[in-house]
Amino acid sequence: MLIEASGLPGLTCPAPAGEHHNVHIALCTKSRDRPALAVPGKPWLATEPVPGDSPSARWQVPVTLRRDASGFDFGGPYVRGDRGDRHLFLAWGSLPGDGTLRLFRGSKLKLTSVDASIIEEATHPGHQLTARIRLTPISGRPALTWSASPAGQGTCGTGCLR
């Protein structure tokens, strides 16, 4: 699966008591397979942080797909939530330089809201599920869109959305 983010918030974000500095956006995971930052007070980690002033961000992660009588279900080290709320999570936080990401906001990419026809198309050979999210909204435009797009490099295996 591919996540493409645009409209990153910048290195400084307003806060009720001042500003957040050295802002980064990271993908949340329970896996220790990639270098990751601790998120104080949370049981998960933040991996592949991207500076908030980058023009865009991109994360490629494995997401497994299972089908049963209840429909689709998603799994993998980057998938969070119970079956009715499966999602990927982008953490917004400050990097103080001590190996942590100080979370102040997040973006939930709900896999359970993806149209079934898009999921079906993404399972075809040479395709992947893609989430495109604009992190700072523009009036009148959706912030998150899902599609099945041509797959990148690497292998995923049966039942995987790349």
Image (cartoon, rainbow, N blue to C red):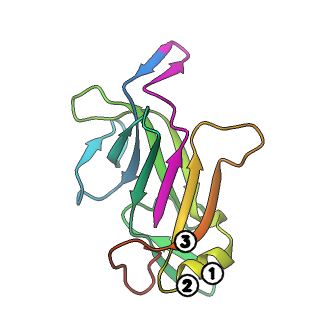
> What is the span of residues highlighted in magenta in the rendered image?
1-18
In this figure, which residue is indicated by the disc labeled 3? 149
Which residue sits furthest top?
18
Dot 3 amino acid type? Ser
Q: Is residue 140 above or below residue 145?
A: above
The x and y percentages for residue 134 are: 59, 45
Crowding at dot 2, Cα within 10 Å, few <14 / some 14-19 / many 20+, comes out as few
Residue 67 marker: 2
Disc 1 is placed on an element classified as strand
Sequence order check: which comes first, mark 3 or mark 1?
Answer: 1
Q: Is residue 12 above or below residue 6?
A: above
C-alpha gap between disc 3 and disc 1: 22 Å
Mark 1 = which residue?
A: 71
Residue 31 in which image quadrant: bottom left
Is there a contact, CB below 8 Å, between mark 2 and mark 1? yes
**Tag 2: amino acid:** Arg
Sooner in the amino-acid sequence: mark 3 or mark 2 = 2
Separation of residues labelled 3 and 2 (CA atoms) = 21 Å
| Marks 3 and 1 in Cβ contact (< 8 Å) | no
The three-letter amino acid code for the residue at tag 1 is: Gly
